[in-house]
Image: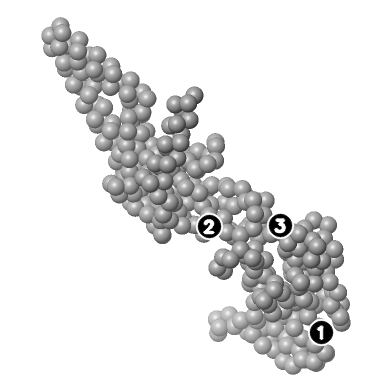
Amino acid sequence: MALSSLTRRLGARIRPRMWPRVLDQGELLLGQRRIYILPTGPGLGFGALLLVLLIGSVNYNLGLGYALTFLALSCALVDMVLTWRNLAYLRLAPVRVADVFAGQEALFQLELRNTGARTRYAILVDVAGVADARHAVDVPAGASASVRLALASQRRGWLDAPRLTLATRFPLGLFRAWSYWYPDARALVYPFPEEGAPPLPAASNSDGEGAGHAGADDFAGVRPYQAGDPLRRLAWRQIARLDPADGGQLATKHFEGGAREELVLDLAALDPRLDLELRLSRLTRWVLEAESRALPYAVRLGADHLEAAGGDAHQAACLRALALYGRGETR
């Protein structure tokens, strides 16, 4: 018991020095210095069997025994080379990760690219620190294969991809070749939207159906469509006259006058006795609700102030600010 505990402690000290955590930027090529290879348990047993065969052949001067011993040894050496080549010179590339809300699973998608003329069989991908997270994949010659890893998110902020171990025992299982990969990929985790949150703060002169910075008193003309413009303000007559072959594009009605007061979602306006994470969760819920109702809204987080707007881009910017608030992390 004491010996196993000492072994674990020594392993915890040595492993970070042998394989430091350095993010692999962009695409990674598994060169010779990135691959390690050692005999497996069956491989050690096979080596012991070869030793017994060799000793018996020497003691009894068995010519066929020598032939069998060296034939089996040749097979083991060929297996070692093929096991190493099954992993060598693979190209590894991370794919962009979709943002999630806290408590959801972030889906990391990774690509294994095989530019060689041989199919790579039985590549095992293990996630460090996650039990039962092994993925087996074959990579055809001149093609690529994708591996999707689901990682649970616990808190808001950036969630880095875990350390991965790529290993193979193909073809005979006498040797295990492996390599470590620290993909430079991360997912942004938004605060979880509060369930049963209070209704949106009241905005004076707001009818709950708002859709822009200005009111709808005076028609001022038509302008090109911009991301975030409400669909109900599209100038359908002008759009119908435009020929796409002539570079036609969407157009939006523009109004002036009668501007309504913007909806401001201010962190400082919430009860300071509430937990910070709860207040951020409430603002997250309000951002989603305002966006679903096409209400222009602004978000204030201390010194950060996002001006009133709408649309997917504005919503993503607000959620990003909420996710990184107080983390001291770059946006």
Sequence-earlier tag: 3 or 2 = 2
SS under mark 2: strand
Distance, label 3 to label 2, CA atoms, is: 18 Å
Residue 55 image-quadrant placement: top left
Relative depth, front residue between 2 and 265 = 2
Q: Please say if 236 is above or below 258.
A: above
153 with respect to 129 (left or right): right
State the mark number for residue 260.
1
> Residue at the spot x=69%, y=73% of the render?
302
Q: Is residue 228 visible?
A: no
What's under tag 2, amino acid-wise?
Arg
**Mark 3 Cα-neighbour bin, 10 Å: few <14, some 14–19, many ≥20:** many
Residue 12 image-quadrant placement: top left
Distance, label 2 to label 1, CA atoms, is: 40 Å
Disc 1 vs disc 3: which is toward the camera? Answer: 3
**Mark 1 Cα-neighbour bin, 10 Å: few <14, some 14–19, many ≥20:** some
SS under mark 1: loop
Q: Please say if 6 is above or below 159.
A: above
What residue is disc 3 on?
192
SS under mark 3: loop
321 with respect to 66 (left or right): right
What's under tag 1, amino acid-wise?
Arg
**Mark 2 Cα-neighbour bin, 10 Å: few <14, some 14–19, many ≥20:** many
For the residues bearing labels 2 and 1, Cβ distance under 8 angstroms: no
> Residue at the spot x=86%, y=80% of the render?
204
Q: Please say if 11 is above or below 249.
A: above
Residue 205 image-quadrant placement: bottom right
Distance, label 1 to label 3, CA atoms, is: 30 Å
What residue is disc 2 on?
186
